[in-house]
Image (cartoon, rainbow, N blue to C red):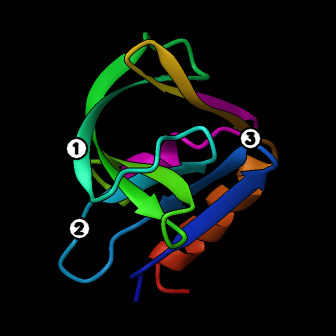
Amino acid sequence: KGQGCAATFSTLNGAITISGPRGDYKQAAITFWGGKIPVTKKSRTSKVTLVQTGGDPPATVLAYHFPAIKGRLGAVILTVPTAQALVDNILDRHSFAVSAGGKPWIKISWRDGNSARRYLQKCLAGG
């Protein structure tokens, strides 16, 4: 009930997955996947800057940086304190840009976020 809820948006530039709690992991996460995100040999933390729709200033945070799809794509995960905080901040149209060391890694937008919000609310409620 309410475990492992996720929604993914993808474009030719990459993908973004928003996901809720699973097992012992009670937080939520935003995962970015893309061809311009450097592929690491092994998982590590990296300092990245996130800019997103909503007028908040850019946030520089530590992200989990790892090789994905058998080392063919780079990926980064940013944690969110709770699944409810993640769901509450889904906008119908939302843009994100992730960079590191002044180099752009991914810029991606979604539309119809209201549909994803409804789905995640239902999933988190166990429906």
Q: Tell me if 52 is positioned left or right of 114 in this view.
A: left
- In depth, the one of 17 and 88 nearer the eye is 17
Q: Sort mark 3 into few (<14), some (14-19) or many (20+) by Cα contacts within 10 Å.
A: few
Q: Is 71 in the magenta?
A: no
**Residue at far left of view:** 24
Distance of mark 2 from mark 1, alpha carbons? 20 Å
On the image, the x and y values in percent for residue 67 come to 42, 59
First to last magenta residue range: 84-97
Q: Nearer the viewer, mark 3 or mark 1?
A: 1
Q: Secondary structure at mark 3?
A: loop
Distance of mark 3 from mark 1, alpha carbons? 30 Å
Q: Which mark is residue 119?
A: none
Q: Which residue is mark 1?
A: 45
- Give, as a three-letter code, the residue at label 2: Lys
- In depth, the one of 9 and 74 nearer the eye is 74
On the image, the x and y values in percent for residue 42 come to 28, 59
Q: Which residue is mark 3?
A: 92
Q: Which residue is mark 2?
A: 26
Residue 31 in view of the camera: no
Q: Sort mark 2 into few (<14), some (14-19) or many (20+) by Cα contacts within 10 Å.
A: some
Point out the tag, 2 or 1, that comes first from the N-terminus: 2
